[in-house]
Amino acid sequence: SVSSAFDFAPNLFPLSSTAQGYTALGAPSNPALDPTNALNGGSLEKNKSLTYLNGLSLVVGLIIGSGIFSSPSQVNKNAGSPGASLIVWVVAGVLAWTGAASYAELGGAIPLNGGAQVYLSKIFGEWAGFLFTWCAVVVLKPGSAAIIAIIFGEYLVRAIIGAEAVDASTWLNKGVALVGLVMVTLLNCVSTKLGTRSADVFMFLKFFALLGVTAIGIVVAVTGLSYKGHANEDWKTRGWFEDTNTNVSNWAVALYAGLWAFDGWDNVNYVTAEFKNPTRDLPRVIHTSLPLVILCYILANISYFLVLPTSVIESSNTVAVAFGSQVFGPVGSLILALFVSGSCFGALNATTFTSGRLVYAAGKEGYLPAMFGNIGLGKNHRAIRLHSINASPGKSRIPRKLVDWFADADAGFFFTPISAMLLNATLTAVYIVIGSFDTLVTFYGVAGYTFYFQTVLGLIILRVREPDLERPYKTWITTPIIFCCVSLFLLSRAVFAEPIQTLLVVAFMVVGLVIWFAWVGRRRNKSKERFRHADEGESVGWRFWKLWSR
Ligand code: ARG
């Protein structure tokens, strides 16, 4: 039988009842909730619990993260003027919006969980799905984790030690970033619940931080009051488009930074199957959540501009701290720094959680060495199961409630894909050490948009190749065309703007293709039976892709 990878994440999406009723590695306690059943024609009725509002908060929560507190400097540096920066933010947002709309059509036409991996396999062949998985494991997941960790480090160092320390040594920031990474990795190795529960705790921080920035900005602009006695007057004397950069490549780099803040829009697809009324609600979710995020980001940026001189915005990745200190003084910067680093820690935790499962699924699938598809500390590791605690409740000094809260009663401590998580943590650490926010954002963007482009191009191909395919939701054909044109522009400019990052991405892809054609792909063709599910596009791992989020 298909051992469901999804079993390990009973509570990642507490909103959806698909996730309920599972026991780790075991059979679903309720057969009606078994996704395999549903695929075989069983009923998914009970799982369809998401409403429009649930979907909205889920998507908005997935997208808003570190970016709006860190990207503005890179956007401004490269766009040159506040007006141009705002244009970049709008373009990035609209690009994300057209992308999400296109993915929604694909999600309806190919109603399997798994997102790009599945669509690419279906449209271009399995090599494309493999290449995506490969790049997700070696570039996208650890790359995004490294970006978030770096921002976490910078904000925390600023909060605790002060601005001078951040500027004095990047190693201090990186050290804190690494400590954060080690902490979340440990957390996620110890237990599933420990990971997901802490995610919930940290989730709300970013909403407060973002709302705070916007509200404060408006108040300061209207009243002209701030800690330093006056609001920033820069924008009154300086034209909004003064000094706009005319170099196209710089605009591309600015766009990558903006796109980072909007990234995560593809996650919309991992919840399609859970909507009560997907045909009606999915488009509604996309066409409200993305404009909403765009609006929030524009307002936050205007707030930054009204409060801070552009030179300050451009000079650091921690614009929210400068903002806090300008408005409220040291206390303000401390509070904002704590909020943002908390939000980043939560995002890092969620990313680590899903990356572990992704790598695990790739190991199970035969895409990676089998050891990465192991659970616990090794093949023969017997997890320290909670049963032992439960069996002798009197002897345990840990309160039962606490134990239940932290760990799945059935999963037990260390009953997690540890080797997978270690691989991910190692790669992330390498990126933290060798990269910086600016370089990693472009690196991530080039790799990410290569696949977004290919996938949306696949939508157009599918329209031509299979015009009669049932498409519960159909975008205007202009949507994917706009997306493809803009992302092609972005990708082509990357070669000139950031040749090293681009080369690295290309190198990783070439290695991936070699691995596929020389080794993994061949082996899979030889053992069709073993990988039967993959050939049907319902690989052992696809359910994990649902967790590819945040
Ligand atoms: N937009 C998020 C941020 O601003 C980044 C999301 C990372 N993407 C992802 N699929 N995990 O931090």
Image (spheres, rainbow, N blue to C red):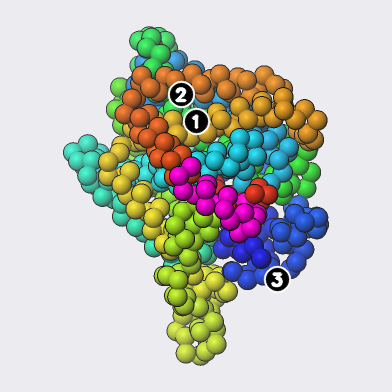
Nearer the observer, 150 or 205 = 150
User: Sequence order check: which comes first, mark 2 or mark 1?
Assistant: 1
Where does the image place residue 203, in percent across and percent down from the top left? 51, 50
Q: Is residue 187 magenta?
A: no
Say if mark 2 contacts mark 1, CB within 8 Å: yes
How far apart are labels 2 and 3 at the CA level? 47 Å
- What secondary structure is marked by label 1? helix
Q: Dots 3 and 1: beta carbons under 8 Å?
A: no
**Quadrant of image for the N terminus:** bottom right
Residue denoted by label 1: 450
Residue corresponding to mark 2: 491
Question: What residue appears at the point 55 percent right and 38 percent down from the top-left corner?
Answer: 128
- The image quadrant that residue 404 belongs to is bottom right
Give the magenta range: 517-534
Q: Badge 2: few (under 14), some or many (20 or more) residues near its Cα, within 10 Å?
A: many
Rendering quarter of residue 463: top right
Q: Which residue is mark 3?
A: 29
Regarding mark 2 in the picture, which secondary structure is present there? Answer: helix
Name the amino acid type tagged 3.
Ser
41 over 280 or under it: above or below? below
- Earlier in the chain: of badge 3 and badge 1, it is 3
